[in-house]
Image: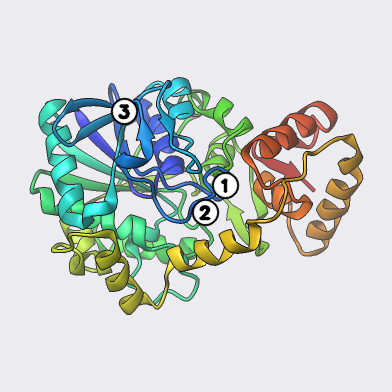
């Protein structure tokens, strides 16, 4: 089987899709948003094809990201470096044309690569939201991707792993919804799969995918994450992988309302009306707050602060604190600052740190 993979939420899901290769995917071709955290891309929302130079147009609507691809300032993207470091071909998924435009891209890529079916990969399970989940923060990307995959009309599966790792829908709710959709269990992510991606977490701040890799390596316990300091659990079920028919999944989510959208703004308005959540508005507010800040470059002088934050997290019941959470706390708010923090902790605290977790 030749599977065309779609990363439901962007870079982190694309990374995990590569780790799934051993149990599910061969010769991975991954369609993915360029929708990064503000420490990578200071512009809110996803990037479009017009934000890049050096994309390789393989066919109409099929734009491959190469290691030499660049973004036009001030935009940023992790995709060129991921294209250089992951054993996969990355194709840009541009949401500017809504679900209709994305479906055109997915269908064109499936035809170009002679794919038998479409596999939509989601870490955390947010794609299964009913729209009313209290912790929901970022439904737009997942719902648009799910709607577009269904709209293509080719065989499509939603693959969910790392239930609850996004800190938005609790793991038990995700697992209940998968059971209700008659999802079937696939082989869990294993050490061979993790070995393909582990090095990426030294510079890429994906929390959910990094925690999933840690869980697949046997880590267990409570992790303090995000700027808000939420807690998520790494358990024996975290690395489990489930597949469900994409049409069946979309029917019980807000994705069913997005099939006719022809612009990102139209899709965003639909999701905002249904869920009350606007991640683009949230990102815009945070970007404005960060605009005049200079990223702190970590040094050995920060180790005392790191240990103080870890001690405080332990008192709050955590076993680990994520590297992204630490970066937020000490103001390492750029990609190079984040990478420097990871390098510092790897060198100075090797018994407590592994990208991207710090044992408290």
Q: Are marks 2 and 1 in contact (CB under 8 Å)?
A: yes
Residue at the image point whose x is 45% and y is 64% from the top = 279
Name the secondary structure under disc 2: loop
From the image, tell me which residue sits under label 2: 165
| Rendered image quadrant of residue 22 | top left
Q: Which mark is residue 242?
A: none
Label located before the other in sequence (2 or 3): 3
Q: Residues within 10 Å of mark 3 (few under 14, many from 20)?
A: many
Quadrant location, the N terminus: top left
From the image, tell me which residue sits under label 3: 55
Residue at the image point whose x is 79% and y is 37% from the top = 352
Q: CA distance from mark 2 to mark 1?
A: 8 Å
Q: Relative to residue 160, is residue 147 depicted above or below? A: below
Q: Residues within 10 Å of mark 1 (few under 14, many from 20)?
A: many
From the image, tell me which residue sits under label 1: 207
In x, y percent, where is residue 227?
66, 60
């Amino acid at each position: 089987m030749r599977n065309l993979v779609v990363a439901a939420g962007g870079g982190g899901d694309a990374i995990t899709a590569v780790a799934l290769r051993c149990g599910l995917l061969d010769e991975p071709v991954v369609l993915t948003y360029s929708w990064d955290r503000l420490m990578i891309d200071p512009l809110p929302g996803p990037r479009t094809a017009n934000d890049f130079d050096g994309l390789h147009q393989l066919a109409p609507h099929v734009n491959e990201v190469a290691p030499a691809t660049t973004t036009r300032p001030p935009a940023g993207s992790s995709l060129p470096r991921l294209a250089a470091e992951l054993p996969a071909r990355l194709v840009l998924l541009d949401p500017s044309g809504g679900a209709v435009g994305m479906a055109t891209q997915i269908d064109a890529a499936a035809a170009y690569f002679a794919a038998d079916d479409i596999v939509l990969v989601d870490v955390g399970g947010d794609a299964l939201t009913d729209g009313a989940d209290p912790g929901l923060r970022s439904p737009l990307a997942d719902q648009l991707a799910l709607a577009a995959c269904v709209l293509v009309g080719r065989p499509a599966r939603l693959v969910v792993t790392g239930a609850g790792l996004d800190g938005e829908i609790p793991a038990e709710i995700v697992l209940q919804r998968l059971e209700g959709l008659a999802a079937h269990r696939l082989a869990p992510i294993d050490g061979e799969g993790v070995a393909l991606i582990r090095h990426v977490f030294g510079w890429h701040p994906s929390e959910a995918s990094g925690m999933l890799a840690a869980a697949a390596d046997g880590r267990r316990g409570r992790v303090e994450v995000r700027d808000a300091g939420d807690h998520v659990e790494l358990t024996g079920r975290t690395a489990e992988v489930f597949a469900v028919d994409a049409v069946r999944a979309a029917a019980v989510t807000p994705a069913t309302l997005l099939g006719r959208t022809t612009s990102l703004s139209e899709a965003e308005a639909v999701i905002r009306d249904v869920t009350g959540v606007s991640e683009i508005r949230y990102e815009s507010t945070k970007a404005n707050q960060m605009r005049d800040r200079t990223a702190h470059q970590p040094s050995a002088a920060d180790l005392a602060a790191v240990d103080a934050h870890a001690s405080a997290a332990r008192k709050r019941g955590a076993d680990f604190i994520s590297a992204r959470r630490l970066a937020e706390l000490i103001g390492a708010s750029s990609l190079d600052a984040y990478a420097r923090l990871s390098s510092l902790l790897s060198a100075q605290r090797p018994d407590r740190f592994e990208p991207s977790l710090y044992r408290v």
